[in-house]
Amino acid sequence: MFPEASKANDCVITDWKISAKVQNKKPLDVRNKFTVEDRRVSAFVRINCTKPVQNAEFCFYRNKAKYACVKLPIKSPKHWRTWASVKALKGSWMVRFRIDERELLTDKFLVQGRR
């Protein structure tokens, strides 16, 4: 879901995927339910900004508690693509994506036990 605050942000998300299978730095399976057997879950984003920006940040929450945040420098604000991943631990997850402290997107996924 895209928060109201993202409308005021100069950057727009042009692609967003959550995946467990990655090949050549590209997601192969887009879904929101995983198992611990997937080992890792990755969030991929592509953005386009018309003004210079400094950093992107992925924050992952597991069972409503902050699990990890990954802050990345943005080298080029036009058609920029990156990702972050976490270990596939059982629980309800949420990932927030921000550009320079402004939230652009929040999404949820679930990691279940073995198949």
Image (cartoon, rainbow, N blue to C red):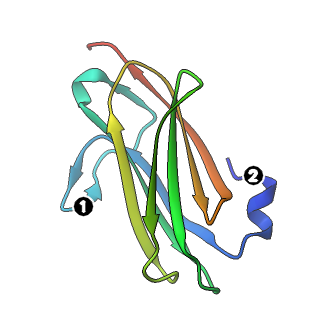
Determine the residue positioned at 79% across, 58% down: 5
Q: Residue under circle 2?
A: 3
- Residue 66: percent from the left, percent from the top? 54, 32
Mark number, residue 5: none
Query: Which quarter of the picture shows residue 7?
Result: bottom right
Question: Which amino acid does the dot numbered 2 rest on?
Answer: Pro
Q: Is residue 17 above or below residue 67?
A: below
Mark 1 crowdedness (10 Å alpha carbons): few <14, some 14-19, many ≥20: few
Mark 2 crowdedness (10 Å alpha carbons): few <14, some 14-19, many ≥20: few
- N-terminal label among 1 and 2: 2
**Left or right of 46, for residue 34:** left
Of residue 91 and residue 31, the one placed in the foreground of this image is: 91
Q: Secondary structure at mark 1?
A: loop
Determine the residue positioned at 35% across, 23% down: 89
- Residue 85: percent from the left, percent from the top? 35, 45
Q: Residue under circle 1?
A: 25
- Residue 11: percent from the left, percent from the top? 64, 73
Of residue 6 and residue 72, the one placed in the foreground of this image is: 72
Query: Which quarter of the picture shows residue 25?
Result: bottom left
Q: How many marks?
A: 2
Question: Which amino acid does the dot numbered 1 rest on?
Answer: Lys
**Left or right of 54, for residue 90:** left
Screen quadrant of the C terminus: top left
Of residue 46 and residue 66, the one placed in the foreground of this image is: 66
**Left or right of 34, for residue 24:** left
Query: Which quarter of the picture shows residue 21?
Result: top left
- Give the alpha-carbon distance from disc 1 to disc 2, as whole Å: 28 Å
Q: Secondary structure at mark 2?
A: loop
